[in-house]
Image (cartoon, grey):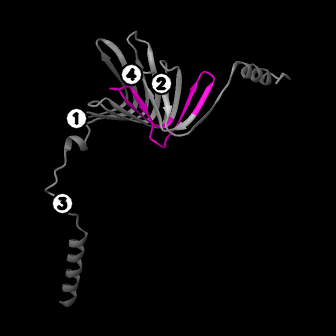
Amino acid sequence: MKINFCIFTILFSLLIFSSCSLKYDQKKDVEEVNPEFIFENTTFKRYENGNLSAVVTASTMERYKKSQAVYADNVNFSTYNSQNQIDNDGSCGLMMADTKTNDFQFFDGVRLFSNSFGASFSADSLKWNGNNQQLTSGRNDYVLIEKDNTTLYGSGFSASGVSQSFLFKNSAEGSVLTENMQDAQNTANNGGENF
């Protein structure tokens, strides 16, 4: 009898101390925990005023009803100008879009080519604010920009689609290949002696 009481006490103690606590006073919003839509191997097209404005393809795309947030992986995207020409073209491993605030975050091997800037941007993460047309990195995140014969690499990146300008808040480094340097480089690459 004493052994049964000891076993019962041990089992009861384990049950009490190992059970999860259900927090009945904290309600979970089912619409935010579970996506409203899940699309696999999908292409999404956005139209504004009857014109194609964006195309996004993704391996998986999830949309959440209440926040109107969209999450996608293995993403390729293009945006179009009013003449129906590609304005921006890019790819990333993960994307988050907040359709309420017009904010987009890109992660994991971000590549972006901007026709308006005439430049390509590479980073681990970038954020685009569609309302003020601002492309930014994190304060200590590095961005590589390649334009014509110029390469820049730095952190604290910010670019404005309105003023068509960019800056690095922290230090940046890079190279500029001038015409004379390019001619010399071409000569050297072709086996020439005039370097």
* Earlier sequence position, callout 2 versus callout 3: 3
- Looking at the image, which residue sits at the far bottom? 2
Numbered tag placed on residue 22 in the rendering: 3
Q: Is residue 182 above or below residue 143?
A: above
Mark 2: which secondary structure?
strand
Mark 4: which secondary structure?
strand
* Earlier sequence position, callout 3 versus callout 1: 3
Q: Which residue is mark 2?
A: 165
* Earlier sequence position, callout 2 versus callout 1: 1
Q: Is residue 190 above or below residue 110?
A: above
Numbered tag placed on residue 55 in the rendering: 4
The stretch in magenta equals: 123-152
Three-letter code, disc 2: Ser
Three-letter code, disc 4: Val
Asked if the stretch drawn in magenta spans residue 151, the answer is yes
Quadrant of the rendered structure where residue 177 is?
Answer: top right
Numbered tag placed on residue 65 in the rendering: 1
| Residue 27 x/y as whole percent | 16, 50
**Which of the pair 49/93 is nearer the observer?**
49
Spatial CA span between label 1 and label 4: 21 Å
Which class describes the residues within 10 Å of circle 4: few (<14), some (14-19), or many (20+)? Answer: some
Three-letter code, disc 3: Leu
| Residue 31 x/y as whole percent | 20, 40
